[in-house]
Image (cartoon, rainbow, N blue to C red):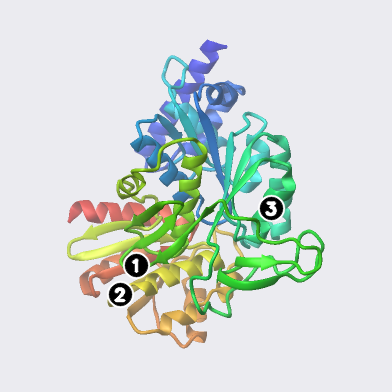
């Protein structure tokens, strides 16, 4: 068995190296090769993790939360296995472990931080049972691929039953996630924002969880933070937002993010209110793992966002921020983050309809693009295979835009003739290519 395991690890590493040489990521294929040679390799390598295994699930925020948690653990001197690139299905998970393993067939790791696609939990949990699951939120996402949220919730419910000792670290402000955690029978702790932050929230946001998952009655909200996240209760059966274990208070989004949790003042040079939840989830995970948080701000400062999650580039005299926007809730928060920047800015929006993106782009009509009519937008360029659909959506919002299917041409044009402050919002299949284009342009200067 050891020879088979060593062969599988070696083959996976060669496969990944070859894929990178030809410009592909290669994580999924490397994991597939390893499993073909040694079907039990994931169980063995996961068993090598000395301390705890975290999985991160949820519609939005998985990659940022997972990578930030990994960064914080590593900054404390721990050895961590992490799928940084976001390959979050079974083969990607296998690849994460085998590519970090040594050629002697062993894995040297204190912790594992694994982002897991919700539907893939049922395929991954038979190989190992995590110690913790961070559940960020549940929003409508790619209906032609995943179906309605009830399907995703049922999958997660089954996954929780497969790992009954797994502690769930759940966003209490999301009624759907909180219902799953509180009804699961698993141990759980919560994080969230107890008090109202904004006096007004957009009235045309898509809000899931309008009906109680326990009894079916209409849910009542005291307030929303965004989308369906807020303070809710059911007047029929009594289901309500659970008590919050890790609460963020005194929140400010000016000049970065700051908030108080427990006795600690947290500060981070990040943009976007939604990142309060990502940081809070990581704080809760670190505390639950029994690790110190006294230097949490320094650990946050050392985190470099990558893989298109608020990733920053400097191309000549232009600052560029690349971010993934893949569903209505996420896109609305991206727009809010862009508009928090009061300086003049150019915006590129890339929309594809490949299999990974979901071929149905009707969700664009659920996004509050009308906010882009506010002052501060210098130009908007739409790119990708469905750029004309995106342009039509903006036209109905009375917002003018230019169409350029080739994102590299669009970026170069804005670098040469823009206002030196560029935001690039892309959905799934545009992310890797856009990242590579921006990285290459940054290196060329």
Residue 418 location, quadrant: bottom left
Image position of 188 with respect to 223: above or below:
above
Q: CA distance from mark 3 to mark 1?
A: 31 Å
| Residue 402, disc | none
Pointer 2 residue: 345
Q: Where is residue 206 drawn, in percent x and y?
A: 61, 72
Q: Nearer the viewer, residue 107 or 221?
A: 221
Dot 3 or dot 2: first in sequence order is 3
The N terminus lies in quadrant: top right
Dot 3 or dot 1: first in sequence order is 3
Query: Residue at (35%, 84%) from the top-left corner?
Result: 375
Mark 2 touching mark 1, by CB under 8 A?
yes
Q: Secondary structure at mark 3?
A: helix
Q: Where is residue 411 drawn, in percent x and y?
A: 30, 66
Image position of 92 with respect to 3: above or below:
below
Q: Secondary structure at mark 2?
A: strand
Pointer 1 residue: 423
Image position of 442 with respect to 128: above or below:
below
Pointer 3 residue: 152
Dot 2 or dot 1: first in sequence order is 2
Q: Nearer the viewer, residue 272 or 350?
A: 272
Query: Residue at (39%, 33%) from the top-left corner?
Result: 18
Q: Nearer the viewer, residue 172 or 309?
A: 172
Image position of 7 with respect to 189: above or below:
above
Q: Is residue 252 left or right of residue 441?
A: right
Q: Where is residue 71 drawn, in percent x and y?
A: 38, 41
């Amino acid at each position: 068995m050891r020879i088979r395991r060593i062969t599988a690890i070696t083959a996976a590493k060669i496969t990944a190296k070859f894929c990178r040489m030809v410009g592909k990521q290669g994580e999924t294929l490397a994991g597939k090769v390893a499993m073909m040679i040694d079907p039990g390799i994931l169980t063995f390598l996961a068993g090598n993790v000395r301390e705890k295994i975290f999985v991160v699930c949820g519609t939005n925020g998985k990659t940022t939360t997972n990578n930030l948690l990994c960064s914080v653990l590593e900054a404390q001197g721990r050895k961590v296995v992490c799928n940084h690139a976001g390959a979050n299905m079974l083969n990607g998970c296998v690849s994460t472990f085998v590519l970090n393993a040594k050629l002697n067939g062993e894995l040297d790791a204190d912790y594992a931080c694994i982002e897991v696609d919700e539907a893939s939990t049922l395929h991954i949990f038979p190989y190992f049972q995590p110690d913790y699951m961070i559940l960020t939120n549940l929003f409508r996402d790619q209906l032609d691929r995943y179906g309605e949220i009830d399907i995703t919730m049922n999958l997660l419910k089954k996954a929780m039953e497969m790992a009954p000792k797994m502690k769930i670290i759940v966003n209490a402000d999301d009624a759907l996630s909180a219902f799953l955690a509180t009804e699961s029978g698993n141990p759980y702790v919560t994080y969230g924002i107890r008090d109202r932050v904004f006096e007004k929230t957009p009235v045309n946001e898509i809000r899931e969880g309008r009906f109680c998952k326990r009894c079916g009655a209409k849910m009542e909200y005291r307030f929303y933070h965004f989308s369906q996240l807020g303070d809710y209760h059911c007047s029929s059966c009594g289901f309500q937002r659970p008590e919050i274990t890790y609460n963020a208070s005194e929140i400010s989004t000016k000049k970065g993010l700051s908030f108080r949790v427990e006795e600690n003042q947290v500060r981070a040079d990040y943009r976007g209110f939604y990142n309060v939840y990502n940081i809070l989830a990581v704080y809760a995970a670190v505390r639950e793992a029994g690790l110190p948080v006294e230097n949490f701000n320094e650990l946050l400062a050392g985190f470099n966002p990558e893989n298109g999650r608020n990733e920053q580039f400097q191309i000549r005299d232009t600052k560029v921020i690349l971010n993934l926007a893949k569903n209505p809730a996420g896109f609305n928060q991206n727009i809010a983050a862009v508009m928090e920047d009061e300086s003049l800015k150019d915006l590129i929006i890339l929309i594809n309809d490949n299999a990974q993106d979901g071929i149905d782009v009707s969700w664009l009509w659920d996004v509050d693009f009308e906010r882009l009519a506010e002052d501060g937008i210098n130009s908007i360029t739409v790119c990708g295979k469905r750029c004309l659909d995106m342009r039509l959506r903006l036209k109905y919002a009375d917002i003018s835009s230019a169409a350029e299917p080739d994102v590299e041409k669009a970026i170069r044009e804005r670098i040469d003739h823009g206002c030196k402050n560029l935001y690039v919002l892309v959905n799934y299949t545009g992310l890797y290519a856009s990242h590579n284009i921006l990285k290459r342009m940054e290196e060329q200067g």
